[in-house]
Every structure is written in structure tokens, then in C-alpha cells.
Image (tube, rainbow, N blue to C red):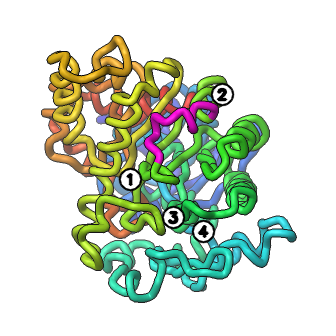
Amino acid sequence: MARAMSKTSPPPCCACATRRRVWPPKGWLGKRKSNMTASARTISYSVRRRSYTRCCRDTLLTRQRGYEITFTEPEIFGGSCLMKDGFRILDSDMHLREPADLWDKYLEPEWRDRGPKILSSTARSSAMVMLDGKILDGYKPAYRGGIYDATRIDQEIAEFRKDGFNAKTQLEAMDREGLDVASLYPSIGLGIMMRSEMDPKLGAAVARAYNNWLYDFCQEDPKRLKGVGMLSFHDPNEAVKEAQRCVGKLSFVGVFARPEPLHDLPWHSRYFDTVWSCLEELGVPMGFHSATSAGEVPQIGDRFGDNLLLRHVVSHPMENMMALADTIGGGVCDRHPKLKLAFLECYCGWVSFLLHRLDNAMSKGRFPTAGKLKPSEYFKRQCWISTEHEKELPMIIELIGDDRIVFSTDYPHGDSDFPEGVEEFLEQKISKESKKKILWDNCAALYNL
């Protein structure tokens, strides 16, 4: 904006101006103070890197460096929103850090003695977990000793760690990264269910407790914090009941599962059909999300033993590759045409290759097939995949289009690009329209926002 702005008065087009802001003091979006009302939220924070574009009512303003600007921020879903470089941003896979006493406080009394015990008070991803009186494999000291949070991000999130990674720090992190809305996935909770022989009723209780805690967490700002529910697949009927509760009572936008299924059953087994039918009816996605450790369930990374680098690098994409092949090639998408599936924290560079291989194998007619459409057509109809900072993204868009790719920061995990994940994505050599789709439109379609 060429027009000079006063250092003390708001720009003339900003009819909702009410509070002073300094642009840009230190930090990427500093500490955020939020006061929610029925029509607006007044927040304060600071900027250091790029010009920060914000929608105030229906007018886009690019804030000039060094000027004080005052306004109340309108509601995100009321037609106006916080924007970075002109883009609304929805994180398809932002993580939170569960407090050490989560299940002690939220688990129903009859299950509390057998429930998860997080044997750490530091909210680190390396905490050991005891479940039903036994430390989960993958959380044992001998295995977890080499896992630590990368020092780069440790420095970035030190203040949040000090505050216990509560909902306020989650919102501060979102402001610092430039996120409007985030769908929330667990950290330790990704591995809690990875014991095939778990008592199904205990598994259901563990999931309920986590989801109740997550609901309370999201109440800090329910317009920005969107819950993704935990299910126990040890009993599909319990999973169905909890999915219905998550969406109907807790207003969650999806549910998640590890791509490594329980009981050595493939995801296309009829054992899971009641869950897929339920998610179809609810209209919410299943987010497949792997992790370096699979607990006590077989995982492709097992062949690397204690080499955590190899386990991490291989498990995330390859477990999701197998889940995609399983659900599409095994007929889940054909039997459940309204089911939504998301493949998260696995990069997207492999998806074109795998879909081509599935299409090619099907076209040769050598093998029985599980549907009338090509696998790539099922993917285009029902699936989404996340991206972070992949230099191959322009090529992937050229190969599969830009309608099924969603943006993710992976905050606050050690390999996240926080607090510059959005900025690095915006530097991608792709069209503005593709950026708009990946940062918001596709995520909004996935989570029905």
C-alpha cells in the first residue's frame, strides 16, 4: 500500500479499529492475548518477517513495517479472517502435547489403575508410557533412549514447554506461524492404542478420556482449535459409538488411526466395515497418521532395530503407502464411496508413483480387482494427502493436480519447520491458486469447515 499511514491512528478503511498494535516488534507473532466475544476477537501480537496481510471486514491491508495499527479482529468464519500474505491457512495436522496427568484426571475411576501412565512430567515426546501395568514396547528406556526433540525447535518452543503446552500456548504457536485454524492430533496418544491384545473395554475408556480432555482443550478457542478424535479399534462397535460421540457431542472434525492395523488384519477386512459405514454417515474423515514407534504392533521400521533415524524416515511414508494401497486396492473406497481418507505426515512425493503402479497392475488384468474405477480415480474422489516443505511439490501438482493436497506444519515435533513452515511453503514455485487450495480450500473440504 503506497499510502502513508499515521503512526497513531488506524487506516481510514479500518472501520473496526479499536486497539493499538505495533508492527513489527521482535518475534514472528509474539504472545497473543485473546478476548472472545460473540462478534469479534481482539488480539495482540507482533511480526518480524514478511508483510502480513490481514482481512479487516472486506478490505485487504498490507501492514507497513514500523507502523502502529489498531483494530479488532473479526470472526474467522464470519466472512473475514486472519490472513498471511493474502491466504487463509488451515493446518491439516497440528500436534499437541498431552499433559502427564491426562488419563489420571480424565479416565473413568474404574479404569484409572489400568490406564496409561506417562512416566514424565516434561511433556516431551520421549516420555515412557505404562499401560495396564506394563510399559508399552517402543516406550521402553532401551528403545526410547535415543529419541529427543531436535535442538532447533527446542529453542523455538522452550517458553511453550515451560507453560506445559496448554491451549493458550497452542494458540500462541498458531499466531506465530500464521495459522487461522488447526485440526489437532496427539503426540504420545498416537501410540497408546498400539497393543493388539488390549482389553477392548479399556481401549474404549482410554479413547473417551483423551477425547474429553481434547474437547476441554479446544474450548479455549473452538473456532480455531478443531479436535480429531481417538478411536479404539479393538472392538469396532466401541469405535463406532465413540466416533458418533466425537462428532455429535464433541463437535470434532474427524478421527484418526495409525496406518498399522491391529490383529494382523488389513484395513480392507470386513472387520472394519462398520467403522467405515459410520464415518460415511457422519461425513468426517479418517486421518491415517504414522509414528516412529508402533508400540507392540508390527511395523515396517522394525527391521532397523534401534536405529531411530531409519525407523523415522521409513515408517511415516511407507506405512501410509501401505494404508493407501490397502484401502483403495482392497476395496474399502469402492464399498464406501462417501468415505473420506487422509494420509498425514508422510510427504506426498510418492503418491503419483504408487497410484500409477496400482493403475498399471489393474489394467493388465492379471490380478483380481476390488472395484470398477482405477485406483487413481478412487484417490481423486475420496482421498487427501498432506505436504510440508517438499521441493517436489510442483512436479506432484503437475502429475496429480492440486485438489487433494493439504498443508501441515507438524508442530511441535522435532522435524517441524515451525515457526517458518508457512513461510517456506509460500516460497514454493507454484501458482497462487494452488497455494490457496492447499493452504485452505482442500483442508476445509476434508474437514467440512
Q: Where is residue 161 in the image (x, y as percent from the top left)?
A: 52, 77
User: Which comes sooner in the sequence, label 3 or label 1?
Assistant: 3
What amino acid does circle 1 point to? Thr
Q: Is residue 16 left or right of residue 112?
A: left
User: Which comes sooner in the sequence, label 4 or label 1?
Assistant: 4
Report, in whole angstroms, how far the alpha carbon at label 2 lies from the one at label 3. 25 Å
Q: Name the residue under label 4.
A: 98
Question: Which mark, by number, is residue 71?
Answer: none
> Mark 1 and mark 4 in contact (Cβ < 8 Å)?
no
Against 306, residue 267 (above or below) is: above
> Mark 4 and mark 3 in contact (Cβ < 8 Å)?
no
Q: Residues within 10 Å of mark 3 (few under 14, many from 20)?
A: many
> Mark 2 and mark 4 in contact (Cβ < 8 Å)?
no
Considering every residue shown, the one lying at the far top of the view is 372
Q: Mark 2 points at which residue?
A: 282
- Nearest the viewer among 44 and 125 is 125
Q: Mark 1 points at which residue?
A: 409
Q: Residue at x 67, y 50 (%)?
A: 221
What amino acid does circle 2 point to? Leu
Q: Is residue 367 left or right of residue 207?
A: left
Q: What stretch is highlighted in magenta?
A: 265-274
